[in-house]
Image: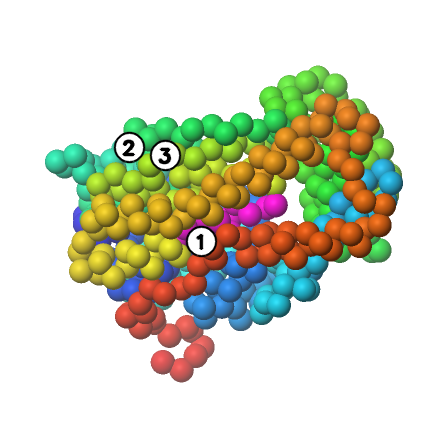
Amino acid sequence: MSNTCVIAGGGPAGAVLALLMARAGVEVTLLEKHDDFLRDFRGDTLHPSTLQVLDELGLAGELQALPHRKAYGMQIMTDDGVVPLASFAGLRHKYPYIAFVPQWEFLDLVTRAASRYPNFRLLMGAEVVGLIREGGAARGVRYRDADGEHELRATLTVGADGRHSDVRRAAGLTPVERGAPMDVVWFRVPALPGDGEEPFLRLSAGRLMVAIPRGTYWQLAYVIPKDGFDRLREDGIESLRASVGRLLPFLAGRMEELAGFDEVGVLRVALNRVRRWHRPGLLLIGDAAHAMSPIFGVGINLAIQDAVAAANLLAGPLSAGRAPESLLHRVQRRRALPTVITQFAQRVVQDRLIRPALQGAARPVRFPADPSRLLVVGPVVRRFIGLGVLPEHVRSPATTPPRPVAGTPG
């Protein structure tokens, strides 16, 4: 079977790119190795840059109808008090907030929009096992599903299949590690009325945690030293409960709800990028090209920006059956600068805040006694987190009319 474009990985980058390609008239197939999107994703923050992209795709109304929460600011809670980090209300943007949307809901929304185009196909439970190669170029993928192995030929193959990318491995591309001093364990604790509705970073000597309100529960990201999860388990669940209770006393009485480590997930943090995002007939985007630290929560948004840039540059040529490597290089060249700058900023935070905190520094970072002094950097921080570096706008053509949505005039 042949397609103009095959995309491996039904995460945010792959789903958005598939929608953009289908909208531009490109025959596109999206492969997702899982049977559904119903998994406990941790990264589900949609920043103003992504909300703007969805608006440009005409999906803003459908997104607002999904269950979600809005955060208009971020703050740091230290042993000395609360310090404001950024207020998105001053962003002067149509969407001055971060939207917390369950990722399975977001992926359903995007793939549902793509399915309105007759030239889009979604294959669930389809795991890439290799590349089809001809004359030194990628010409599609081999994938496995419940019925066995199959070939799917394509003019362009896109690896959007995450930090453990099967496409990247099959292409022989290896990321260069930039280093991360921490891993993150995730778990939930019930929320009560009056807890607060803004996410915050809790910082103390030797301990660090991010708390994200989810309505009925708090999603907690407890930061531990790199490769420290085995030690955490050895110390026992009681030790973790006590540590969280000391960091966040208002949750201390609820920590018994965390029954054991079977309710705890671990994210082994990676910060890396490949030197070359492409080969003839092949392009990597998102985490497959550059795994991001969870710092600032920008990974999803950076990946979606990659997808928009790729569609802007490639949709027109692909609709004519062409994907010259010079254009694939232009995608990398455009998105490399935002990637490098963002990863540099993440490394600065790792080295100046996270590493000292995990090493038990008495005051891992010094904040001014007058929090208003942070307003000097506040506009820079909120723009960087909210919009990122070089935000993309949808410029790919919309040449294929979608099927009407059920219940609307055809």
Stretch of the chain drawn in magenta: 296-307
Q: Amino acid at mark 1?
A: Gln
Q: Amino acid at mark 2?
A: Ala
Could you say which disc has been placed on residue 171 in the image?
2
Task: Decide which of tag 2 and tag 3 comes sooner along the chain.
Answer: 2
Image quarter (top left, top right, bottom left or bottom right) of the C terminus: bottom left
Task: Decide which of tag 1 and tag 3 comes sooner along the chain.
Answer: 3
Q: Is residue 340 left or right of residue 167?
A: right
Q: Residue at x 62, y 28 (%)?
A: 182
Helix, strand or loop at label 2? It is loop
In this rendered view, identify the residue nearer to me: 194 or 409: 194
Q: Main secondary structure of the magenta part?
A: helix
Q: Residue at x 45, y 77 (%)?
A: 407
Q: Position of residue 243 (x, y in %)?
A: 80, 29
Residue marked by disc 3: 275
Q: Is residue 406 above or below residue 245?
A: below
Q: Are marks 2 and 1 in contact (CB under 8 Å)?
A: no
Q: Position of residue 50 (x, y in %)?
A: 51, 58
Residue marked by disc 1: 305
* Numbered marks: total: 3
Helix, strand or loop at label 3? It is loop
Q: Which one is closest to the eye, mark 2 or mark 1?
A: 1
Q: Is residue 163 left or right of residue 320?
A: right
Q: CA distance from mark 2 to mark 3?
A: 13 Å
Q: Amino acid at mark 3?
A: Arg
Task: Decide which of tag 2 and tag 1 comes sooner along the chain.
Answer: 2
In this rendered view, identify the residue nearer to me: 378 or 387: 378
